[in-house]
Image: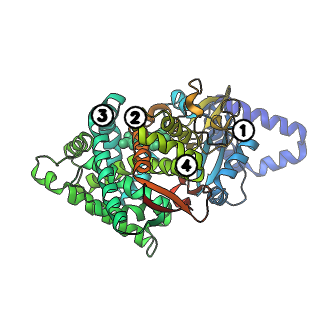
Amino acid sequence: MATLVRNTVSLFKQLHDAFPTVFSSAALCTFPTLIAYLFLAYCGNVRESEKPSAIPVPAMESWIPWIGKSVQLMQDPLTFIVESRRKYGPLFEMTTWGSKLIVATDPGMLMSLEHQCKDLNPSTSRVDAFRALTGIHDSERMTEVMSTRIMPVSSKILSPSGTLKSGLMAAFNERLVHNFDVLTADLKANDPKIMRLSDFISYHLFCASTNSLFGPTFPFDSYPHYAIISSSIQILHSPMANWPFVACKARRARQGMIDALIKYTEDWWHNGGQIEGASQLVGQSLIIMKEENLSIEEAAGSLLISLWGALFNVSAMTYWLTAQLLIEEKIYTSLREEAVDKHYMDAPLLESAALETLRTGSVPPPTRSVDADAKIIVDGKHYFFQKGSRIISEILILATGDYYNPDIYADPHFFKLERFFDESLPRPKPFGEGHHFCRGMHLAKLEIKSFISHTLKHFNLKVVGLKELPKLKRAGLIPDVLGSDNITLEISLCD
Ligand code: HEM
């Protein structure tokens, strides 16, 4: 305070010396102004001394308050982010729908931010995702139980050795083969089937994944609800989701899915015992949820979240790989020859194709919220991150990132089937980085490879009409791979 008074007196002296007449009369007439000045300067000084001496993250200007850059981000996010990076560098800030969003565009950046600052956490975005997917407004408790109690159990079960021992893949394959047998019988009796590629992938992966997690008592006929939810995720995430007459179909589907999961859990929840064929992952999660006094509806919501986490990205990556092989005949033929000869776990071409898919595919960006003002070093510069900002790590959709760097991957924009025969190439990691990297990555890779191998062994797939890779759309920040689908398939039996 003493410094402040000294500074104020000195300021007065300087102003008086510079403008003696004007200042003296003004000062005499405006004693209240002086008090106000002292007060404001004091507040300013306090804030100044608390602020770290760091530069702000470069911010985009926008003429439209609140909406900021939301429209550009929704319309063509890829071009928008790539151009923004060129203009502002690898870290920049923009306003979308009233909140500040910091975009981190280089691999390793999120991990470095997390290591330097303990006040970055994923909870806010996860609470939002829980709300969007389950419709349960008060979802903080569910998120906390998932993060603190269920995540450690999942990490153990989904480790490389855990995944092999868990029986998850056996149950996945069992249902996939069952579905394909049903389709085979149908194709024997009827004409070839015409359908969208995304519907083919999404339905069979849904059945295989739910069987693997929940066992054979899962209500597989809930798929239509899931399909509606996954095509409406953007609107369910938006602030309009709860307005009357908006997203009614999507909200009904969401409730339908929760009801199906309640029905699945009910008997065990009230009477105990065991759910036939349920994975250890689901069994242990349910025990924890009951111990934590979640309601059965919250438990069903949490199961839906787990299913979504396990299925959404696997479907998107499987779609991407299938689209590539349908567009390029050589890839199709080579992978099919290998599939007939070799098991999917011991198929080098398929392994390389899966890695190439993970290099070029797209996933929703990991998001963190900044819980307290922080000073963080990026590329040797100290940046000030304001409390309340959100950070997204956009490393995969960028044609400028490492995954498209021609010095690392030759002809990076081409899908090269045999690229990863070169063992010296860095393996792509679309599974996040830092504290919250994907726990299911080993399972995910096995599921993608198994799906492709079984499909190629059972069926002939042919594109009907337009033979072109889809241009990726986004649902808000989420890459909408399945929603971008423009491939129609004719499915027949192998000769
Ligand atoms: C190709 C498929 C997949 C991709 C690309 C993928 C990607 C990701 C990414 C980027 C994250 C980090 C999110 C963040 O930092 O906020 C993540 C987290 C997670 N993933 Fe995956 N995932 C896939 C499949 C799976 C599967 C099959 C499972 C489980 C069955 C799974 C379980 C998890 C879990 C539990 C987390 C949260 C980890 C934590 O918060 O500590 N994922 N995933």
* CB under 8 Å between discs 2 and 3: no
Residue corresponding to mark 2 = 345
Is residue 474 at all visible to an observer of this figure? yes
Residue type marked 4: Leu
Quadrant in which ligand 1 is drawn: top left
* CB under 8 Å between discs 1 and 2: no
Location of residue 405 with respect to 207 vertically, above or below: above
Q: Residue furthest bottom?
A: 245
Q: Label 1 vs label 2: CA separation?
A: 41 Å
Percent of width and height locating residue 130: 39, 53
Disc assigned to residue 325: 4
Residue corresponding to mark 1 = 89
Q: Label 3 vs label 1: CA separation?
A: 40 Å
- Closer to the camera: disc 3 or disc 1? 3
The type of colouring in the image is rainbow
- The residue at 53%/49% (across/down) is 320
Query: Left or right: where does residue 107 sit relative to residue 237?
Result: right
Q: Label 4 vs label 3: CA separation?
A: 32 Å
Residue corresponding to mark 3 = 157
Q: Earlier in the sequence, mark 4 or mark 3?
A: 3
Percent of width and height locating residue 33: 71, 49
